[in-house]
Image (cartoon, helix red, strand yellow):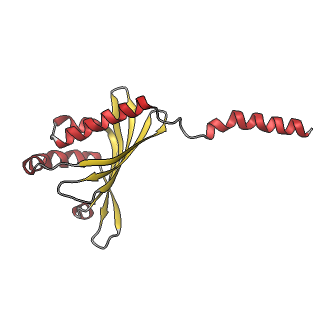
């Protein structure tokens, strides 16, 4: 009787456990694909290309984590429509001052069948320290797209424009 219970339990665990397990580990091929996409995103941003916005899903969630002068943080969600408008307005000024972001300590992780997470340190224009940045990327029929972007920032105006 106990053998039947144990064998039944083992069968249950073997059959059901994969349902609760995390996604398969990311492969070298997937890392290369995601890395290529992310490098394209960085290059488009740093060279002020028109196709920069094409790296985002139409309904992407954009979030800035504003670091206040007292060290506390406040999250601000930016609607995609506003984000696109601000990118277009700021692009000329950014190009004039040669604003660029550099990304270090990049890590790639598979979080779903066609979903990945990129974490890194973003080093903005003339910054020495760096700020955390996280991207969720989905694979679509049109290629990879950023579905969520969360970045720390010291720019306080995001708080007044909520």
Image point (33%, 27%), residue name = 142
Q: Quick one: which residue is furthest to the top in this view?
A: 141
* Front residue (pair 58, 95): 95
Image point (24%, 41%), residue name = 42
Q: Quick one: which residue is furthest to the left in this view?
A: 96
* Front residue (pair 41, 92): 41
34 displayed left or right of 85: right
Position in image of residue 75 (x %, y %): 35, 60
Position in image of residue 140 (x %, y %): 38, 30
99 displayed left or right of 16: left
Position in image of residue 84 (x %, y %): 22, 44
Image point (68%, 36%), residue name = 16
118 displayed left or right of 15: left
Residue 108: name its quadrant: top left
Q: Quadrant of the C terminus?
A: bottom left
Position in image of residue 56 (x %, y %): 30, 39
43 displayed left or right of 118: left
* Front residue (pair 58, 101): 101
Q: Quick one: which residue is furthest to the bottom in this view?
A: 70
* Front residue (pair 55, 81): 55
Q: Quadrant of the N terminus?
A: top right
């Amino acid at each position: 009787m106990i053998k039947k219970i144990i064998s039944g339990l083992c069968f249950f665990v073997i059959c059901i456990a994969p349902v609760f397990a995390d996604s398969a580990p990311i492969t070298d091929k997937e890392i290369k694909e995601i890395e290529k996409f992310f490098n394209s995103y960085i290059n488009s941003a740093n060279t002020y290309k028109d196709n920069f916005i094409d790296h985002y899903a139409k309904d992407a969630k954009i979030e800035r984590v504003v670091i206040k002068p007292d060290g506390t943080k406040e999250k601000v969600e930016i609607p995609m429509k506003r984000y696109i408008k601000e990118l277009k307005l700021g692009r000329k000024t950014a190009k004039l001052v040669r604003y660029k972001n550099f990304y270090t300590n990049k890590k790639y992780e598979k979080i779903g069948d066609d979903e990945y997470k990129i974490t890194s340190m973003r080093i903005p224009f003339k910054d020495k320290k760096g700020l955390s940045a996280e991207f969720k990327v989905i694979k679509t029929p049109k290629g990879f797209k950023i579905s969520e972007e969360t970045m720390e920032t010291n720019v306080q105006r995001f708080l007044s424009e909520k």
